[in-house]
Image (spheres, rainbow, N blue to C red):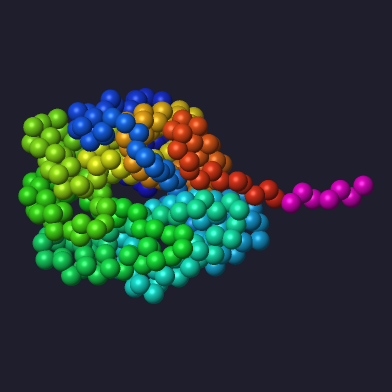
Amino acid sequence: MDFGRVLPEQLERVDFTLPPDPFLTQQVLPGKRATDPKLFLGATRWTVAEWAGNLYPRTTKPPGFLTAYARQLNTVELNATHYKIYSREELRKWVQQVDDAGNSVNHPGEFVFCPKLYQGISHRGALKGKENLVQEFSSAVQVFNEGKFTKLGPIFIQFSDSFAPGRQVELLEFLASLPASVQWMIELRHPAWFEASSRMQDFFGMLAQLKIGLVITDVAGRRDVNPMLLTVPNVMIRFVGNQGHSTDYSRMEAWAKRLGQWFACGLETAYFFLHLGEEALVPKFSVYAGQLLKQKTGVGTAVPVLEEEPKQGSLF
C-alpha cells in the first residue's frame, strides 16, 4: 500500500500516538466483554513464493500456497475482488483450498475472507444504478460461507482520495440499499471526512444507525484516517508498517493494548491486516503480532508457527 507512506528518514518525526476514543466509540461499545469475542490476523495475499521455507513448508508450491497460509493465519484481506467480479466457481476453489488446511494441527479453526468491493462499483461514476453489480458481487462472495472452515467476513468498500463529503447524501443512500445480511465497512480517504464538525459527527452517527463499519487505516503520512472511531462493535484495521522500522513494533504494542481495552468494553470482532511494505517481513512480524495480540487482549487468534529450513549435514 503506497497510500500515506513517508520516507524512512521522516518516520522519527511522525507522532504515532493512537488518539483517545471519541464519544461515538464509547457509545457503540456496551461496556462489558462480549460473550464470544473473536480476533482475526492476516495479510493481504497468500501468493508469496519467498514464504516457502518460513511461513510455509519449504517444499510448498504455488497451488498449495493458500492451504499453507490458512494453516498459519486466519483471515486474508482479499484485494483481488477489487479488480473483477469472480464467479462462484472461481471462489469455491479457494474455499476448497482452505478446507484442505483443516487436516493440520496448526489450523486456526475458522478462516475468514474479507473481500474488497469491485472498483467498478466504488470508483467508476455515480454509486446510483449499481444495484445489479452489487447483487452479482454479494451473491458470489456468499460462497465463502459454504466451506467447512471458511466464513465471509466484512465486505469493505474503499473510496478514492477524491471521494469527498460533497457526495455524502449519495453515499448514505447507497449504503442504505446494501444487503443487510452482510457486514459492510467503508474506507474513506478524503481529509474532509475527518474534520471535527457537527456535520461529520452526524454522518458517522448515520453510519452507526445503518450498522456500517468504518475501516481504520494506521499509516504514517495520514494520521487523520486513524480516528479510532467505531460505528459498530466490530473493527477492521489496516496496519501499514514501514519495512520493519522500530516504530512498527511500538505501534503494534499500542494497538494490542487498545484492542485489549476495546474487547474489555464489548468489542465483538477485530480484523487486523498487516501491510508491511516488504512481504519478506510478514512471517516473523505476524508471529510477533499474533503473540502480542493474544497476550494483551485475552482473545485467541492465529499465531503462526514458522517452518525451519532443514540444516545442512556436516561433512566431518
* Residue 73 position within the rendered picture, expressed as x and y whole percent measured from the top left: 50, 50
* Residue in the picture at 46% in, 59% down: 149
* Residue in the picture at 64% in, 56% down: 57
Q: Quadrant of residue 205?
A: top left
- Asked whether residue 279 is drawn in magenta, I would say no
* Residue in the picture at 18% in, 36% down: 194
* Residue in the picture at 18% in, 42% down: 208
Q: Which residue lies furthest to the front in this view?
A: 35
Whether residue 227 is visible here, answered yes or no, is no
Say which of 209 and 309 sits in front: 209
Q: In which quarter of the image is residue 102?
A: bottom right
Whether residue 156 is visible here, answered yes or no, is yes
* Residue 106 position within the rendered picture, expressed as x and y whole percent measured from the top left: 58, 51
- Asked whether residue 313 is drawn in magenta, I would say yes
Say which of 129 and 270 sits in front: 270
Task: Report the predominant secondary structure element of the magenta stretch.
Answer: loop
- The reply, left or right, for residue 191 in relation to residue 152 is left
Q: Residue furthest right?
A: 316
244 w.r.t. 313: above or below: above
- The reply, left or right, for residue 224 in relation to residue 281 is left
268 w.r.t. 174: above or below: above
Q: Give the range drawn in magenta.
A: 310-316
- The reply, left or right, for residue 118 in relation to residue 89 is left
Q: How many marks?
A: 0
214 w.r.t. 13: above or below: below
* Residue 128 position within the rendered picture, expressed as x and y whole percent measured from the top left: 10, 62
* Residue 151 position within the rendered picture, expressed as x and y whole percent measured from the top left: 39, 58
